[in-house]
Amino acid sequence: MIYIYIYIYILSGGSNLLINDQKEFENVIYMKDVDRNLKQIKDDLFYVGCSLKIQEVINGINELNYGGIEELYSLPALFGGIIYMNAGIGGKTTSSFTISDFIVRVKVLNKETKKIEWIKKEDCQFSHRKSMFHNDKYIILGAECKFKKQDIKKSKEIIQERLKFCKEKQEIGHGAFGTCFSTADSRLLKIVSKLKHKKGNIRFSSKNNNWFVNDGNGTFKDTMFLINKCIKLHKLFRKKIECEVKIWD
Ligand SMILES: Cc1cc2nc3c(=O)[nH]c(=O)nc-3n(C[C@H](O)[C@H](O)[C@H](O)COP(=O)(O)OP(=O)(O)OC[C@H]3O[C@@H](n4cnc5c(N)ncnc54)[C@H](O)[C@@H]3O)c2cc1C
């Protein structure tokens, strides 16, 4: 028997993806309508479908006076992508929370066995912007989560504060994929941003050297050029660097 291996790309909000604009990707599953359920199972225990926008999840639980994840309101992401990336607030050492703090177990489709499984949080290998789902063996369908009891008024205040913070600290209204490197030396990123600030219509953000901004019609190639400059300088100084953005090439 001959097996043909077909790699399946999974697309949720697309907010953490850098995709080669010169290539076509045939096997892509867009997760937008796969599971849009949000159910309160009992007290603080909820089931959250992978296809919900994070804002829909936050609004839904806030209305029932639960919360804890309001600061994720600014992410243009779906819940499945949030779990995969273990999205959170703050850096590696300054993190105030990640979604894994709220997860009990994750519902997945095993791509190999084609069976639905539940994976306990302890087995998900969550770490800074990582999870075992990076092995790409699973499609995340949803998760059971425990949220904090929280007055809706307080939740709304946290959301407003977060949006204000993002307006001040992030370049809103431009193409971006958030933080580019999950591990990098901030001094070296600063040096590259000074030496080579821009390639085509892609540039380092004026507010954060770990963000690239697309001023319009910026290309994959130009973004990779700047990313590779950062990687090369880190290699030269033997410093650790790791991409957070997922690259489809
Ligand atoms: C303006 C802006 C602000 C941001 N701020 C933050 C921040 O504060 N904190 C933070 O952590 N991140 C931030 N990000 C990055 C991004 O929003 C997160 O990484 C988010 O978790 C990605 O979710 P997504 O739905 O967009 O996933 P996508 O970008 O669509 O996918 C990301 C990866 O997950 C995989 N994937 C997605 N869904 C599934 C699924 N259901 N099953 C299996 N694999 C899947 C994809 O194949 C891909 O490899 C920001 C991005 C932007 C553009």
Image (cartoon, rainbow, N blue to C red):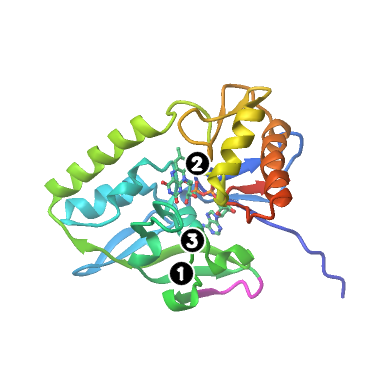
Tag 3–tag 2 contact (CB < 8 Å): no
Nearer-the-camera pick, 112 or 243: 243
Q: Which residues are magenta?
A: 112-117
How packed mark 1 is, by other alpha carbons closer than 10 Å (few <14, some 14-19, many 20 or more), is many
Residue in the foreground of this view, choosing between 224 and 115: 224
Identify the disc placed on residue 107. Answer: 1
Residue denoted by label 3: 128
Q: Amino acid at mark 3?
A: His
Residue 235 colored in magenta in the image: no
Q: Main secondary structure of the magenta part?
A: loop
Q: Residue at x 61, y 71 (%)?
A: 114
User: For the N terminus, which image quadrant?
Assistant: bottom right
- Rendered view: 58 above or below 205: below
Q: Is residue 170 above or below residue 155?
A: above
Residue type of the residue flagged with mark 2 = Gly
How far from the left and from the top, in percent, is residue 17? 59, 44
Q: Which residue is mark 2?
A: 178
Residue 194 position by quadrant: top right
Kindly report the distance in space between the C-alpha atoms of the residues bearing marks 2 and 1: 26 Å
N-terminal of the pair, mark 3 or mark 2, is: 3
Residue 27, image x and y in percent?
69, 51
**Element under disc 3:** loop
Circle 2 residues within 10 Å: few <14, some 14–19, many ≥20: some
Which mark is nearer the camera, 3 or 1? 3
Percent coordinates x, y for residue 141 in the rendering: 48, 62
In the image, the residue with mark 2 has its CB under 8 Å from the nearest atom of ligand 1:
yes
Q: CA distance from mark 3 to mark 1?
A: 21 Å
Residue 114 inside the magenta-drawn segment: yes
Q: Are marks 2 and 1 in contact (CB under 8 Å)?
A: no
